[in-house]
Image (cartoon, grey):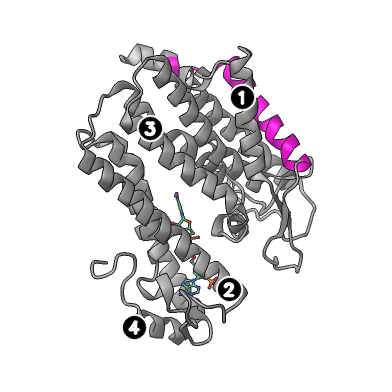
Amino acid sequence: MDLNHLLDALLPSWTSAAMLLAFFVYLAIVGSLLPGKLVPGVTLSDGTRLHYRCNGLLSLLLFVLLLGVGAWMGLVSPTAIADRGLELLSTTFIFSFLATLALYVVGCKSRDRSSSLKPRVSGNLIHDWWFGIQLNPQFMGIDLKFFFVRAGMMGWLLINLSVLAKCIQEGNLNRSMVLYQLFCALYIIDYFIYEEFMTSTWDIIAERLGFMLVFGDLVWIPFTFSIQGWWLLSNKVELTTAALIANCLSFVIGYRVFRGANKQKHVFKKNPKAPIWGMPPKVVGGKLLASGYWGIARHCNYLGDLLLALSFSLPCGISSLVPYFYPIYLLILLIWRERRDDARCAEKYKEVWEEYCKLVPWRILPYVY
Ligand code: NDP
């Protein structure tokens, strides 16, 4: 695609804006109507707690079903997203920009003193717009932070499905596309099965809602994590059986480590005596888990996530670095994040953390790092 075509394709449109709006309206309606476990968030500094209705899986499956029926009846085009990829990207970017400006203005005017809504203004407009000024802003009773992250993860799957439809339409479906689609779909569905785990993550409990988070959720996740799918649309890969087996192993091992480690910590925090791999847990200083995955490396969950990211790219072969954007980005992000988390834990747990580090010297990859 030459520069002129690229710029044309990037022009936002009212059709894209309408598609985005329809998606948000759907999510807002089903998010408050469909049944789902009501999960209490962490206790905030003023003693209050938000509650999150975790019905993301049902909302997603219903949406895919409705789109499927709509496509079958000829009401919607299954390739609508893939046909307008760049246009949707720029429209979503503009939406993120405008929405966070509105959040800034509304936040500044807020007189609310609760931990969720109290504006924390530094006086530097760019800083406040980028990082946000309120912890949990709402719109018509909807918690926007939880809403946007849900929209981003679902958006990723919707883009992938549309790319798949385009691939089938062009008669180019091959093993690589099937593997890529399957692994991503399983990962996203798994995310929604365990949606309640999101309610205790750093982004939800500690970050204010500004451009950084909104852009990350709405633009970065769906549009960059799907690069492999777009790449496979215009590049042909012949996977050998050995590569296919290695690819499946990377996904299965990655998934087990990622989900296993996150689950072990989640269970440990709720019940520090719960058995790990069928045995009583090894605990350092009464606070830190040092058995199971947390006895192998201090962030085995990152290792699992990296293997999963690799499994999304391996179906593209090794002829180009472009499809490896996601694992490379994640590697840099998680190494940086591990360092920050290490500093935070050293500060919080002091000598208990030192003892844990002696017992478990590896940060992410045992015997290497
Ligand atoms: P973690 O889930 O690893 O949580 C780190 C926190 O867990 C620490 O701050 C500490 O908090 C607690 N902790 C650390 N070690 C122990 C231990 N041995 N025993 C008990 N508690 C411990 O961090 P993240 O929120 O960064 O990651 C969550 C998941 O999200 C990971 O799987 C990661 O891969 C994934 N992720 C994915 C990204 C993506 O773009 N795909 C981006 C970022 C994360 P406390 O003070 O509560 O004890």
Tell me the CA gap for discs 3 and 2: 38 Å
Q: Mark 2 points at which residue?
A: 269
Q: Which amino acid does label 4 sit on?
A: Lys
Tell me the CA gap for discs 3 and 4: 44 Å
Q: Which amino acid does label 2 sit on?
A: Lys
Magenta stretch?
9-33
Main secondary structure along the magenta-highlighted residues: helix
- Residue 358: image tag: 4
Answer with mark 1 or mark 2, whichever residue precedes in sequence: 1
Name the front one of labels 2 and 4.
Answer: 2
Name the front one of labels 1 and 4.
Answer: 1
Q: Is residue 239 magenta?
A: no
Q: How many numbered markers are drawn?
A: 4
Q: Residue at 55% of width from left, 59% of height from top?
A: 202
Q: Residue at 34% of width from left, 69% of height from top?
A: 363
Name the front one of labels 3 and 4.
Answer: 3
| Image x and y of residue 251, in percent | 36, 49
- Residue 178: image tag: 3
**For the residue with label 4, is its CB less than 8 Å from the closest atom of ligand 1?**
no
